[in-house]
Amino acid sequence: MISKLTIRRLVLISTITTLVSLGLMVMGIVFPTPLLLVLAMSLGQLFGTLSLALYLLAIVLDLQGVGEHDEIAPHLGFEGKGAGDAGGEGEP
Amino acid sequence: MPQIHTLEQLLKATALVASAISILILLWYLARRPPLGRMTKVMLLFGLGVMPLGVALTGNIAGFEYTLKRDFCGSCHVMLPYTMDAMDPASKSLAAVHSRNHNFGEESCYTCHADYQLFGAMTTKVNGLKHLFYYVTEYANTGPYGEGGKPIHMYKPFQNGMCNRCHSTTAPSWLKVEDHAGMLEDIRKGEAKCIDCHTGESIHPRAFAHGGNGRPPASAAAEGKEAQP
């Protein structure tokens, strides 16, 4: 079950992937050797695109209100796994 | 502080500034882990989307610009006999003479070797990927100038169009050369190749004499002389 925690994890993965992507692209700019340039233009941009897609997915899920009722779900008879996870990282 | 003189330097500086902004935003998020409120989302949109897109765009253009440069070609050691000769102000080789022309300048390798056709820049870059593959798989452990590697050759014959971009075959000084005038039609049709007479040895003599291109040295004397760049 998708919960608020899943959304936060998506954003976290997206953030880390972007940092890796930026690292590769900056390496290609600072040390423009053939191998690093190819890595920057292939893997770097693949990771960058992937991370942006993950972030946009997270935003779409958030805007759809996914996981907003996790806290009250058990009281309504829904015992989904995500219900117990909600707020696990200090989500207000 | 480094000065910005060229478009490539400006693009690189822009890419580095954009990546620094992006990294700061992402580190702020990782350190603080704020709730995903509107402000955080907008900040992350800049850190994860807008700025990295800017880095990719400007970095790509700067990277492509740099791949046109002779320094880039010379960054693979097997190309050093070619690029060092082209850069040598005392060399009388065709490559060096052309490199001293400001229309070729720092981009003399690309100017002569890029495919002269529609999408030539793209096909040249695809061939560049093949270069990289062969360099890593076959030449990485060769000698300082590529000694011991397989002979280096072009993927396809050098076309007259590469020369005719500048040498239009109509200039009086060019037509004065007896061989040019005698083979004019054949040259224009491409049936006689410029490099049939202006051979690799006259274009890149150091590479051919040195043996750094995988071929045996022209002579031991030449090798001894060229081994001290």
Image (tube, coloured by chain):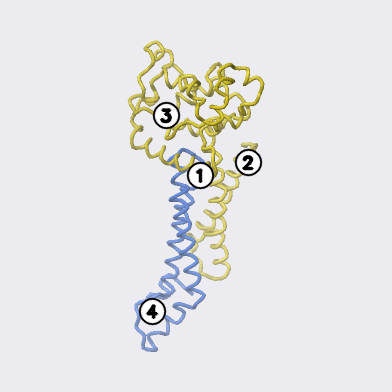
Chain colours: A blue, B yellow
Image marks 2 and 3: residues in contact by CB distance under 8 Å: no
Residue at image position (49%, 61%) is A52
Question: On residue A83, which mark appears?
Answer: 4
Tag in front: 4 or 1: 1
Residue at image position (50%, 46%) is A26
Chain containing the residue with disc 2: B
Residue type at tag 3? His
CA gap between label 4 and label 1 equals 52 Å
Tag in front: 1 or 2: 1
Residue type at tag 1? Met
- The residue indicated by pointer 2 is B7
Q: Which type of secondary structure does the marked residue at label 4 adopt?
A: helix
Q: Residues within 10 Å of mark 1 (few under 14, many from 20)?
A: few
Which residue is more in the foreground, B32 or B58? B58
Mark 2 vs mark 4: same chain? no
Residue type at tag 2? Leu
Q: Which residue ends up furthest to the bottom in the rendered image?
A: A76
Which residue is more in the foreground, B90 or A81? B90
Q: Would residue B128 appear left or right of B176 to someone viewing this image?
A: left
Mark 1 vs mark 2: same chain? yes
CA gap between label 2 and label 4 equals 54 Å
Image marks 3 and 4: residues in contact by CB distance under 8 Å: no
With respect to residue B179, does B27 lie above or below? below
Mark 4 vs mark 1: same chain? no
- The residue indicated by pointer 3 is B77
Q: Position of residue B90 (x, y in %)?
A: 55, 16
Q: Position of residue A7 (x, y in %)?
A: 44, 70
Residue at image position (47%, 63%) is A53
Residue type at tag 4? Ala
Q: Which type of secondary structure does the marked residue at label 3 adopt?
A: helix
